[in-house]
Image (spheres, grey):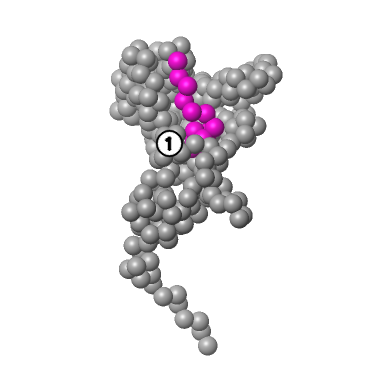
Amino acid sequence: MSAKPPAPPTIAQLQCNSLANLVQAAIERKILEGTLRAGDKLTEAALADELGVSRGPVREAFRMLEEAGLVRTEKNRGVFVREIPVEEALEIFEVRALMDAHVGRKLAQTLAVAQVRELRRSVETMEAAAKAHDAPAFHEANLAFHDLMLTLAGNAKLTAVYRKLTKELMLFRRQNLTPESMAVYAREHRQIVKAIAAGDVEAAGRAMFDHVMASRERTRIKHGLPAEGGEAPLPAVSAAPTRSPRPRGTARRSA
């Protein structure tokens, strides 16, 4: 006797799932903005009252947030915003550096003039925020720049993993931007776009890789860990063809 197919979800189930997604987004926003800090306990009843929902969607939102790496559940104690140790943060930087190098290489091979213009406009937004010493605006522009690069790279799986790692890092390091650091980051982003626009695959990959690894090194120093000397090795990639920088006058990205 063949098994019956699973019953389709009821309207009530669909409504609950939709509410859980909204609740998850609301709690995540509080965590990433710093309203809820690392180590804070999340109370199901309090959040349900605050958000005007029943406890079911909040419970499901907790499950999704745990899968996303933003909260942890402790038996008999409850749900807490995750605290990322510095050692884990350094590992995340390493993984992100490799992913960013891949994105840089790919974009140097594939981007058209109009898409390079988009990246330049994004960098200009960052530069304006840096000149205005507007750290919140710079932070948003920085996130938008990297998200745009992911979108242009066109790899949905990589994008999902990258965004998860970015959120975990945001748990670890609340943005502490200074006029000096914003100027450095903006300059590094400008160099990244320059390499991509020139079609220089290796330079674009190296610029992306070094940008992330420099942040990793600053993190080590800030937390009193010994600095790692020398340039970090960037793995060679042979799976996809690369090309040398174009001679002057032949670049297709002269926008």
Residue 171 located within the stretch drawn in magenta: yes
Residue 178 place in picture, x, y as percent: 45, 15
12 falls in the magenta region: no
Magenta extent = 166-178
Q: Is residue 30 above or below residue 247?
A: below
Task: Determine which quarter of the picture holds residue 148.
Answer: top left
x, y percentage for residue 158?
49, 41
Residue 85, compared with residue 199, is above or below; it is below
Residue at image position (34%, 62%) is 15
x and y percentages locating residue 90 in the rendered image: 61, 30
Q: Is residue 170 left or right of residue 218?
A: left
Position of the C terminus, as image quadrant, is top left
Q: Nearer the viewer, residue 159 or 78?
A: 78
- Amino acid identity at mark 1: Thr
Camera sees residue 30 = yes
Label 1 SS: loop
According to the picture, the residue beneath numbered tag 1 turns out to be 35
- Note whether 25 is above or below 184 in the view shown: below
